[in-house]
Image: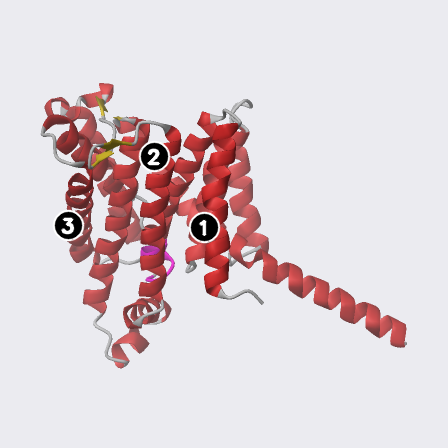
Amino acid sequence: MKSPLRTRLLLAAALVALPLITAALDRPYVVYVYSLLLVYSVACVGLNILTGFTGQISIGHAGFMAVSAYASAIFTGRYGVPFILSMLISAALAALLGLALGVPALRLRGHYLAICTLGFGVAVSQLSAVWEVLTGGYQGMKVPVATILGFRFDTDLKFYFLALIVAWLMIEAAINMINSRPGRALMAVRDSEVAAMAMGVDLAKYKVASFAISALYAGVAGVLYAHLVKYVSPFDFSGSVSMTLLASIVVGGLGSIKGSVLGAIFMTLLPHLFSRVKNLPLVLAGASIVFVVLFLPYGLVSLPAKVRSFAAKRRMSKDGNAAA
């Protein structure tokens, strides 16, 4: 059995080698898609912390991505703020908005909370469309190339490694948090608020904190997206993006960091793999959600265990028939 460290090293080696091989084959668009997978993986991990681990539904998460994307575009493009500082400020701004949204959301549950977050996402999208002086309106605005200490991430391959480092750090941070005492408190809130209160868990504190942390992750993803595409507009953060993020964690596996990444990869690749067939990605996305809900309620992350269980039952059946 492989150790966690060895598994991580093999994964890191694969994530470094794959884009290098792809770039050597002169497929820059594929490398761009790799970066896009990393961006949405960060966003889905954050959303899963809120929905999968804490049990609070959000269908307006693209709003947090939009706020940080526009903020970074403005800071770096208009005021010359360094990229790293811009990312930190923009992600912190998204986290503050998550904190502000989390406080009134304490009184809401289920579909009421979902509608509240949907309203937030729609409001941000509409505001970015009509506030032309700040955001450029429907025409959007250009985003400068990400630069760190004079090094410009001006190619798809260069930006991929920047996104890889950020995504790796964010995902490792999420894993460590979930395995710690705060992470167990979040899961206690999800499983039973009454039991969590009986164990001394501060419901308000952890619910609001999960909103802020989730928004922080969405903020980081929004900044990476803006500097990857080098352009932002209201169409980049519509309600369909929020629904795709939610569908990703459902398909990948609620309450699982690995499931977040698997779901992000699956739901992001569909439109690119079947882009030549009109509306087919939407049909496949809907069908995949129905399939997962019916046959894999714990998401794609549970598929290997299902396969092993099925194989074990087949072997036991064959052994039983042979003994008879």
Where residue 218 appears, as percent x and y from the top left, is 28, 45
In which quadrant will I find the N terminus?
bottom right
Q: How is the image coloured?
A: secondary structure
For the residue marked with disc 1, what is the amino acid?
Ala
Q: Which residue is mark 3?
A: 96
Q: Is residue 56 in sight in this rendering?
A: no
Residue drawn at point x = 16 percent, y = 31 percent? 76
Residue at the farthest top position: 139
Q: Nearer the viewer, mark 3 or mark 2?
A: 2
Look at the numbered discs 3 and 2 and tell me whether their residues touch, using CB distance below 8 Å.
no
Marks 3 and 2 sit apart, C-alpha to C-alpha, by 27 Å
Q: Residue at x 56, y 55 (%)?
A: 296
In the rendered image, residue 90 lying in the magenta stretch gets the answer no
Q: Are marks 3 and 1 in contact (CB under 8 Å)?
A: no
The residue pinned by badge 2 equals: 159
In this view, the mark in front (3 or 1): 1
Report the residue marked by disc 1.
12
Q: Position of residue 172 (x, y in %)?
A: 35, 57
Query: What x and y, as percent, mark residue 321?
Result: 87, 71
Task: Determine the image quadrant of residue 35.
Answer: top left
Q: Quadrant of residue 71?
A: top left
Residues at marks 3 and 1, CA–CA distance in whole angstroms: 32 Å
SS state under label 2: helix
Image location (x, y in percent) of residue 196: 29, 75
**Segment colored magenta:** 48-54
